[in-house]
Amino acid sequence: MTPIMQQPFEFTYENLPEVLHRAVEALPVANPQFVITNEKLAEHIGISPVWLKSDAALQALSGNAPAIAMAYAGHQFGHFVPSLGDGRAKLIGEVIGPDHIRRDLHLKGSGRTFYSRGGDGRATLGAMLREYIVSEAMAAYGIPTTRALAVVATGEKVPRERLEQGAVLTRIARSHVRVGTFQYLAARGEDDALRALVDYEVARNFAGAPAGPERFIWFLKQVIARQAQLIAQWMCVGFIHGVMNTDNMSVCGETIDYGPCAFMDAFHPQKVFSSIDQNGRYAWDKQPVMALWNLTRLAEAMLTLFDVDRDKAIALAEAELQKFMPAFETAFETGMARKLGLQICDGEFIAITLQALADGNADFTNFFSTLTTGADVTSFFVNADICIEWLAAWRAHGVIDGALMRAANPIFTPRNHRIEQAIVAANAGDLQPLHRLLKVLAQPFEQHPDEAELALPPTAEEEVTQTFCGT
Ligand code: AMP
Ligand code: MG
């Protein structure tokens, strides 16, 4: 049975203290047109796919409906900004799926809000398609993520480095509460609102919380555990988030805010993609350290909830934060062992593997997916000897489980050059490359013989070295 969308949308976030949100007026755009809609996702989350094709949906998903903008603060590249918030986004409501999960419908690029500061509140078609492609690939890998329900072209131009087509993305999330949301309240001494926010988030996304005041430290513990898993999952598919600021870290453990992110082609542990990340703060191998840094900011923001005695509160928080690195390492080692077809794998052999890949300048995705098929992988290395030596060491590790490897090693990732090609074509009115890419990324562990070239790394001319914030 086709699920019927709840009309009107629910709005539980509005019941939270006023300091957390501001009303946003309906804001029609010049000429809204759907660029892409995600019917499968609609059904999954309890929205009628028929409605999704309707004019009512086009109006709602282009921003022509009242909504709320969420307040948050954030550490951006290490610098605290006490007031950020949805400057070009708004929450248009919540839906409950057939799985009984409540999800936010959030627009991005939908115009100015109370939190816009100097910004125009708008987003480019290219950036919104990029988020659509990458978040849907993440979902297909089974990695927790926000998802993309639709992109609507606004028919308006957005001035960036040049004039770009404007677009609005509908983002679906189990919540948009970020580390920065807690920081926003802590910076204002809003302890009651902090408690309300924890209770809200726990009720939505964290089962099994204790009832008393110990629920606050319990919540921190859960957030830490989820982030440890998430970062390990990112790293096992060669993903670099790019902008792991505290306002871009969702406490429910979903990947959020796909800006200058990327999947690596040739492996290097210190690879960075964002042009604004000059110091490599969010490089591939720095992601666990930076996640812990962000979680430490979350713990600081919640300190007054843990215990009235500050020293005791700090001790409680530290005891939990100390669990992050071991949890990450276990998750990463388990994930890498699966990629290698091994039941268990020590950190030392993973380090050797990564070193060999880096020394050989080997393509991360294709190395593992080809290793899975049993075909020759030496050609991925600039020096075949590095690979031959590594292969001997790998085989010495015991029985290799092919099924384990097939489930852990995607054949297709949204490579930057393919995303760029899809965006360039879409800007010129040709959506075929976009749909082609999305089709293989929906089943990224399967062979798609007709689309094998989508698995190839970029040629020298195709290579996109940096992803700009051209958002
Ligand atoms: P982001 O880098 O996308 O995570 O955004 C960081 C902050 O800047 C958030 O508060 C955004 O809402 C805000 N922001 C980004 N782009 C714009 C824009 N074009 N107009 C207004 N606010 C923006
Ligand atoms: Mg953001």
Image: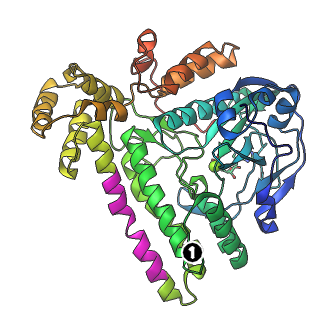
| Residue at which label 1 appears | 216
Quarter of the image with the C terminus in it: top right
Magenta span: chief secondary structure = helix
Query: How many residues crowd mark 1 within 10 Å: few (<14), some (14–19), many (20+)?
Result: many
- Across and down, in percent, residue 451 comes to 46, 13
**Which is more toward the observer, 159 or 172?**
172
> On screen, 248 above or below 441?
below
Residue 412 falls left or right of residue 63: left
Residue at the extreme top: 450
- Across and down, in percent, residue 107 comes to 75, 41
Residue pictured at 58% horizontal, 55% vertical: 250
Residue pictured at 29% horizontal, 31% vertical: 403
Assign a secondary structure to mark 1.
helix
Mark 1 CB in 8 Å range of ligand 2? no
Q: Which residues are magenta?
A: 314-331
Quarter of the image with the N terminus in it: top right
**Which is more toward the observer, 332 or 426?**
332
Residue pictured at 41% horizontal, 27% vertical: 445
